Amino acid sequence: MTSPKTARADTGKPLGEFGRIDRYFRPLASGFPGARGLADDAAVFGVPPDQELVVTTDAMVAGVHFFPDDAPGDIAAKLLRTNLSDLAAMGAAPYAYTLVTALPKTVGEEWLAGFAAGLGEDQARFGIALAGGDSVSTSGPITLSVTAFGLVPKGGAVPRWGGRPGDRVYVTGSIGDAALGLEIAYGTLEVADDSARAALLGRLRRPDPRTTLGPRLVGLATGCLDVSDGLVADLGHLCEESGCAAVLESGRVPLSNAARSVIGDDPARFAMALTGGDDYELLFTAAEHAAPALAALSAETSVPVTAIGHLLEGPAGEVTVTDAQGRILDLPTRGWDHF
Amino acid sequence: MTSPKTARADTGKPLGEFGRIDRYFRPLASGFPGARGLADDAAVFGVPPDQELVVTTDAMVAGVHFFPDDAPGDIAAKLLRTNLSDLAAMGAAPYAYTLVTALPKTVGEEWLAGFAAGLGEDQARFGIALAGGDSVSTSGPITLSVTAFGLVPKGGAVPRWGGRPGDRVYVTGSIGDAALGLEIAYGTLEVADDSARAALLGRLRRPDPRTTLGPRLVGLATGCLDVSDGLVADLGHLCEESGCAAVLESGRVPLSNAARSVIGDDPARFAMALTGGDDYELLFTAAEHAAPALAALSAETSVPVTAIGHLLEGPAGEVTVTDAQGRILDLPTRGWDHF
């Protein structure tokens, strides 16, 4: 729970590490006995014998992954939700998480209170609790990371690499909202309609991880990941790991009303939606015969599931994007490039 | 495995996130099937039904927890070992870990190679493997965190709060080396003897987590934590959580030859040893009748175990430090103050 330190004892601060943990973080751990009240060196928990633990870690840095003046509750929500989205992409149900905060001394209690409130709201919403963590100070920007734990039936985790030629490609919800929201946030996209503008910014700031649908994909989906680098790039990742190619029928890609109104007939904006990141929808593949089960699941969970293409034999990772007329669509980029 | 991003696509770098993961981190995960080759959204692993998972997180920031020009292999070792020490303090055997790196763009491949080599050496030494993680860039200092997983028999984790009046207080190894090493590193302590100097700096840079002895304390120790804030402060934490007081007989506190030679008759330096942090020895309590078993365990594991005091009824967290003559020793501070 505590870190080594090279700096010397730093007393006289209004509320030190233990005080801040007490006030803001201990309440978040009260629902999870394994957290041991954040009073021990570590958390302790069991995993049911018929289940496995799914573990994911995502970090966010102010100025890189969020705007420094974003509301602390939004930052908390995005931090937790991006991790929950990774769990969902594995077919895992949320269980617990640990949190590391590295905060500059300029971050005061108001920020912390907003941040903790955001975590608390999302804990209730997604049924997850704080199990432990560490808080340190930094001379740099706010740096946050969450390690999230989920549970999945033994052997049931849905891998990225399970897609097979002939499988249909599906995506949940709608695509492109966050990418358009990011352009609005940057001031490079003007949207006159207030409600469309709010909807797109909302999707950027508070993505909606598919934690209900994800675990239901176990045994149905052959491959799955969440859309964080952009739809085309992420389909490329799935294909690469699965050793096949894909056709993405862009005319079938589900768009929200807000996105549709902003995109209009502008091919550049449409490309932005197809290749922008941060949607945190599930992109998955399933055999043809799974279609009726997926339709029923979509109806039951009220999560839209749309078929947008298929996998085929071909160079691993190759994604051909077609337009509504079946012609090949040339995109300026596939999406966020980690390479 | 990947984070959301607000900055736009950043291409043309010599080796991007995926390239760096491929070259430096994927080999560290090859021994752990649950890591899924770092190619999936998350790691997946089971926990044997008779065991529980112990989870701890420690973060380190350049300039706060280590010196920016420390050797990257030393930084890696300290990062991993401080986490392994937390596991040992719970009685848990090392199992796996996840890693988050937030690195400034100035950190090049040479640093990364040294850092990964340090992790690799320690993985072999402590029998642990990389299970997953995230790597992001930052405009601030190098920021690192590890979440470490250990296994402990069900219900066997040793808590901080299990100490009882009458229990003896024990500590492993020797105390104060890291605190003296830190003064040397700061240039505020001159040590002429090269080997003493190297020994003290070595203990600061590469603490020796008690991963072999720790798990053997299950069922023997009543309370345990690792010494990271300073011996007196950490004994205070144990007492506070256990609801009792303690007497610490400073004349019994084990010192290394290097520490003894540097301390000499200087009470200020002795106080430094008693209250300085970063020793990462185990400080634990056990009933009187456990003494023979502890002596045998010490002999078997070649880890020195020394009785240094006892718990008693009294104000929770009160630690009375006595000198060799049984007189009360006044210390300028208890140690690192998080409050």
Image (tube, coloured by chain):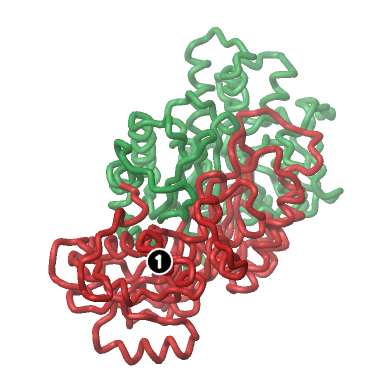
Chain colours: A green, B red
Q: Quadrant of residue B37?
A: bottom right
Q: Which of A112/A179 is in front?
A: A112
Q: Which of A229/B212 is in front?
A: B212
Q: Is residue B176 left or right of residue B144?
A: left
Q: Which image quadrant: the C terminus of chain A?
A: top right
Single out the residue that lies furthest toward the right.
Answer: A315
Say above or below: A137 vs B184: above
**Can you give x and y, in whole percent of width and height, for residue B335 in the image?**
35, 56
- Say which residue appears at 76% left-offset and 48% top-offset: B109
Q: Quadrant of residue B294?
A: bottom left
- Say which residue appears at 28% left-offset and 46% top-offset: A22
Say above or below: B245 vs A89: below
Disc 1 packing (10 Å; few <14; some 14–19; many ≥20)? many
Residue bearing the label numbered 1: B226
Tag 1 subunit: B
- Say which residue appears at 67% left-offset and 53% top-offset: A160
Q: Amino acid at mark 1?
A: Asp
User: Helix or strand or loop: what does disc 1 sit on?
Assistant: strand
Q: Is residue B161 left or right of residue B80?
A: left
Q: Which image quadrant: the N terminus of chain A?
A: bottom left
Q: Which of A32/B176 is in front?
A: B176
Residue A294 visible in this rendered orientation of the protein: no
Q: Which of A23/A235 is in front?
A: A23
Single out the residue that lies furthest toward the top.
Answer: A192
**Can you give x and y, in whole percent of width and height, for residue A278 in the image?**
60, 34
Say above or below: A178 vs B37: above
Q: Quadrant of residue B317?
A: bottom left
Q: Is residue A147 left or right of residue B109?
A: left
- Say which residue appears at 20% left-offset and 61% top-offset: B318
**Can you give x and y, in whole percent of width and height, for residue A244 in the image?**
80, 51
**Can you give x and y, in whole percent of width and height, for residue B47 in the image?**
48, 71
Residue A108 visible in this rendered orientation of the protein: yes
